[in-house]
Amino acid sequence: MPRFPDHLKGHGPQNPFPGIKVLERRLGREIPYRLGSNEGLDMPHAALRAHFGDAMVEHAYCYGDSEALGVRQRVSAQLGTPLDSLLVDAGADSLLALVVRTVTTPGCTVVESRGTYPTFGYFAESHGCERIEVEYNEGPGRLAPDLEALITAAHETEARVVYLANPDNPTGHVHDDDAVLDLRARLPEECWLLLDEAYHDFRQDADSPFAAEVLPGVIRLRTLSKAHGMAGMRIGYAIAEPQTIEMMMKARIHYAVSTLTLAAAEVVLDHPEETRQHIQAVHARRERLAEHLGSLGADVLPSGTNFIALRMPSSELAASIHADLLDAGSLINRPPSPNLGHILRITAVEEALKPGRLAALEAALAECS
Ligand SMILES: Cc1ncc(COP(=O)(O)O)c(C=O)c1O
């Protein structure tokens, strides 16, 4: 089993504010009079009510359920993952910070791919960890996190965590389940595999049994920001062994997910058909975008996400297209890491398919071919 820091082992620290919802469940009855949490219960909220309506104000007054039971129950029912292997927090980014706080101490080494989604490395560094980066594996039709290089670096540096975004951002690459299991099996026993599955729902095999599995020594992260369209509300969840979830609960900010967000997530999760249809529409748009740009000669990388990544002939050309599009009012993504400066990432929304929206890119592709 990978290691936890010594200060989290044993009984403490205890969450000082589990809150009224947790107490109600422990007592098995409702507590009708909230006189102890110093909330602003008498605030009339006329302005808020006028702006957003009564339903929103209902969620403004009270601290929420620190265990996010309603959301966890719905995720558990949909995936089949046991309730005690699920933890909810304010998006995958918050979960990345939580994992850093739960499994590392300053001075630990963490390993990731150079240029991958940067938030984990940023949080790890700000926690005093040493960040080791390995190069991507690049070839014709392929730009992928290099699992062999991650394994080698983890052994050489006695890493505490290996981070893998799967599907990857910014490349869109998907490593299959066997590759992930092989990676876990070949990492040092004390090293965690942090699997950032923010784009999981866009995988063709998103509903496979493996998707719901609790994998020993692995912390899997998901978000409702992408396929569920809730990025502004901040909510995501982790899948891990119950003991790992318990440790994460010791380091978690108990009310980081607002009552409004919890309620909204419950509504969205209660309507999975809408999410399913949205995902299908994203797949169709992604294919249309890839086909269109591919037909103009672009090197479009395979993607299991809600975006496509193009590999341009040079970093300079990618930079100038990015700047020209921005001048015309369209912001696409060019990864900040110099080794991926030749990549352009475009979200597969309808707006990207509007005639003229990507004119500077189309003109550059025509010039190249
Ligand atoms: C790989 C990856 N992980 C995490 C996130 C952050 O997700 P959230 O909005 O849930 O914090 C993103 C967002 O772009 C991402 O691309």
Image: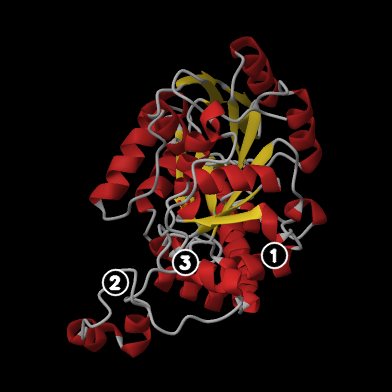
Looking at marks 1 and 3 on the same chain, the residue that comes earlier in the sequence is marked by 1
Residue at 68% over, 26% down: 147
Q: Residue at x 18, y 83 (%)?
A: 47
Residue at the farthest left position: 47
Discs 2/1, front: 2
The image shows a total of numbered marks equal to 3
Quarter-wise, where is residue 68 in the image? bottom right
Could you tell me which secondary element the residue under label 2 belongs to?
Answer: loop
**366 sits left or right of 327 in the view:** right
Is the residue under label 3 in contact with that under label 1 (CB below 8 Å)?
Answer: no
Residue type for callout 3: Glu
User: Would the CB of label 3 be found within 8 Å of ligand 1?
Assistant: no
On the image, which quarter does residue 172 sit in?
A: top right
Q: Earlier in the sequence, mark 2 or mark 1?
A: 2
Callout 2 crowding tier (Cα within 10 Å): few <14, some 14–19, many ≥20: few
| Camera sees residue 166 | yes
Residue named by callout 3: 350
Mark 3–mark 2 contact, CB under 8 Å? no
Residue to which mark 1 is pinned? 76
Q: Residue 261 at what x, y percent from top left? A: 43, 69
- Badge 3 element: helix
The percent coordinates of residue 225 (x first, y second) are: 49, 60
Of 249 and 209, the residue lying toward us:
249
Q: Position of residue 108 (x, y in %)?
A: 51, 20
Q: Amino acid at mark 1?
A: Ser
Quarter-of-image position of residue 59:
bottom left
Q: What residue sits right under mark 2 in the picture? A: 39
Q: Nearer the viewer, residue 25 or 152?
A: 25
Residue at the far top: name it.
Answer: 156
Q: CA distance from mark 3 to mark 2?
A: 43 Å
